[in-house]
Image (tube, grey):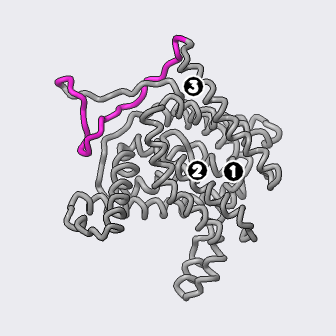
Amino acid sequence: MQETRTFSDKIWLVLKGLFMGAANKVPGVSGGVVAFVAGFYEEFIYSLQKVNRKAFALLINGRFKSFYRYINGRFLSLLILGMVISYFSVSKLLDFLIDHYELFVWSAFFGMIIGSIYYIAKDFGEWNRKYLAYLLCGIIAGVSISFLEPARENSNLIFVFFCGIISVSGMTLPGLSGSFILILLGNYVLLLVDSVNALFDTFSELLQGNTSFVHNTERIAMLKILAVFTLGSLAGLVSLSHLLGYVLKRFKKATYAVIIGFIAGSLGVVWPWKTKQIEYDAYGNIKIDANGHIIIKGYDRYWPSEFTLETFWAIIFIFVGGAIVLSLDIYQKNKSSPTYG
């Protein structure tokens, strides 16, 4: 899988990792869809699949260059670099945009997912009853997950490790949003907001020569949670990639049918017109979690009752989101097109 990459290819790969990482942080959006549409999904899966016994044997024996080549290290390192950058840049921007322009952000993502469905399905080929059944299974699974009720926050380290394994599903399974799964598990704010902010604050203090955080028990606890979550994520990436690599080799077209259905079923999560279901206590007061965040039970989705200027712009952003994805099709025509076995 290792190949020679030009400087522009390397920059593009970092950017793809950046968008993939940003997508993973947005509830309802899957980083795997970015990988799929940008044309590097299979290479991503098969590269992760190379993290196996042979790779660890090369590493233990000090054959670092062989290890790096064997796991397609240049590809993975550039992609991961983009993801890391996104967590401290694009992710922050997305948080700001969702807070201030929530309807338009969800509209753009809704359009992107519709564009992604078209992009993935256009080269599928002939649909028969078997593949339509797989498609329907994917749709049912996606819709079912969309309407589950969120759980309570849980900082138990074993549970946090499990959350790490589950959260990376969005990177390996297009259509399954890892961040949305974390919302359902009750740990989205803890793992993708509070712990990441704790790491950011720690780096900022270290750059200023300030090490007082070592006496901050709450900060240390957050960093410990983030470390366990990261380990769980790495374990999930490797284990899921092996499973998907096996499935893609033997049931490729059926797998793609399920993925297309799953993405279509997940549209309900990013439906732009929705209101938050805020949780109240027995006295009618808004419930706040341990970190000062309002507890959200879920969302009420609705159709816009009036065609206002805001609705007009939301529809425009849906088309813009779709156009962004479809414009990648033009770029990909100069590269390798998706093939189905």
Q: Circle 2 — which element? A: helix
Could you give the CA–CA distance between mark 3 and mark 1, rounded to whole angstroms? 25 Å
Residue 95: say if magenta: no
Q: Residue 323: image x %, image y %?
A: 70, 36
- Pointer 3: what residue? 314
Could you give the CA–CA distance between mark 2 and mark 3, rounded to whole angstroms? 22 Å
On the rendered structure, is 238 left or right of 165? right
Q: Is residue 197 above or below residue 216?
A: above
Q: Circle 3 — which element? A: helix
Type of residue at label 1? Ala
Other residues around mark 3 within 10 Å, as few (<14) / some (14–19) / many (≥20): many
- Pointer 1: what residue? 38
* Residue 96 location, quadrant: top left
Type of residue at label 3? Ala
- Pointer 2: what residue? 19
Q: Is residue 260 above or below residue 24?
A: above
Residue plotted at (41% across, 53% down) = 163
Q: Is residue 7 above or below residue 23?
A: below
Q: Which residues are magenta?
A: 283-306
Q: Nearer the viewer, residue 77 or 124?
A: 77
Type of residue at label 2? Phe
Q: Residue furthest bottom?
A: 61
Q: Nearer the viewer, mark 3 or mark 1?
A: 3
Could you give the CA–CA distance between mark 2 and mark 1, rounded to whole angstroms? 10 Å
Q: Earlier in the sequence, mark 3 or mark 1?
A: 1
